[in-house]
Image (cartoon, rainbow, N blue to C red):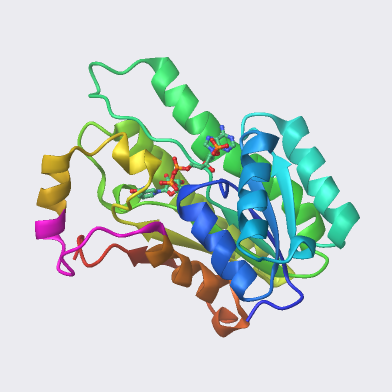
Amino acid sequence: MLEGKVAFITGSSRGIGKEIARLFLDNKAKVVICGSKLENAEKLENEFREEGYNKNLMMAVGINMTDNTSIQEAVQKTIANWGKIDILVNNAGITSHESLLDSTDEDFEKMFDVNVFGLVKVTREVVKYMKETGGSIINTSSMVGIYGGKNQSAYSASKFAVNGLTVSWAKELGSYNIRVNAVAPGVVETDMMKGSVNDKMKEMLVQMTPLHTMAQPSDLAGAYLYLASDAAKFTTGTIIKVDGGLTM
Ligand SMILES: NC(=O)c1ccc[n+]([C@@H]2O[C@H](COP(=O)([O-])OP(=O)(O)OC[C@H]3O[C@@H](n4cnc5c(N)ncnc54)[C@H](OP(=O)(O)O)[C@@H]3O)[C@@H](O)[C@H]2O)c1
């Protein structure tokens, strides 16, 4: 579905991003694997090579979402190697749990620096090139970016902002034939989730989910493939929930 396309996927060294990268490779895209450090991205690139993926379809870069220089260097390296970026997946993110009264300005600043301002920095840099060819931008949101989350106001607010950017950019960039959509996962079994949901909460979430299971990262990837592909060529400004029905 993605033959000839170049995909730049932030936060793809592990978790949800790793499985998006895998599915895009399965669909013959060229994939830029991004970690917060180059060695994290290279580790996954090596793992994929050992699994038999074509090394010519992969490139590893390190980008720090809070550092414009590392972002610009990674985008320019991609353009130098592959000439274009057709698909941008803004997936890198962090989470935190704190009540309003326990929170500090720094908690909110750190959250927004990565989840919002970092995403803006990457998108601005990529769109400089993508506006020449058209393309698809897919932002990773969250169910708490639609419904809020108790003791998660910094994270939740950052994902509300991601949704706002998604629809605003869909309106703004449509004239360049750039589509902008988001995927809002429920709870997904990754390092991020393991750090914030204990076994009891996990069991409760499974019971509350109509599909009665916890999502694995690979369960999310299909939504990204759809939005990246020409099958979604008339879809822009949408936020697709992939949460097993948890938030109905
Ligand atoms: N897991 C869930 O339940 C869940 C639910 C809803 C939404 N989400 C969203 O889904 C996305 C992926 O989450 P995940 O669960 O896969 O997380 P994860 O397993 O913790 O992976 C996070 C990814 O983001 C990268 N990253 C973190 N901070 C970064 C920074 N400052 N600069 C550059 N890259 C950075 C990490 O790179 P390194 O490996 O190099 O550190 C890693 O690739 C996030 O946006 C998250 O908010 C997750």
As drawn, which residue projects farthest toward the right? 80
Query: Which SS does the magenta portion mostly show?
Result: loop
Q: Nearer the viewer, residue 195 or 10?
A: 195
As drawn, which residue projects farthest toward the front? 50
Image side of residue 195 versus residue 230, left or right: left
Image side of residue 128 versus residue 244, left or right: right
Query: Looking at the image, is 153 positioned above or below residue 171?
Result: above
Can residue 21 be found in the magenta stretch?
Answer: no
Tell me the quadrant of the picture where the N terminus can be found.
bottom right
Q: Residue at x 52, y 39 (%)?
A: 116
Q: Nearer the viewer, residue 191 or 146?
A: 191
Image side of residue 204 versus residue 237, left or right: left
As drawn, which residue projects farthest toward the bottom? 231
Q: Residue at x 60, y 77 (%)?
A: 229
Residue 80 percent across, percent down from the top left: 90, 53
Quadrant of res 57 = bottom right
Residue 217 percent across, percent down from the top left: 40, 58
Q: Residue at x 34, y 30 (%)?
A: 96
Q: Is residue 236 visible?
A: no
Chain part drawn in magenta: 206-217
Residue 126 percent across, percent down from the top left: 74, 52
Label total for image: 0
Q: Is residue 207 visible?
A: yes
Tell me the quadrant of the picture where the C terminus can be found.
bottom left
Image side of residue 197 versus residue 72, left or right: left
Can residue 207 be found in the magenta stretch?
Answer: yes
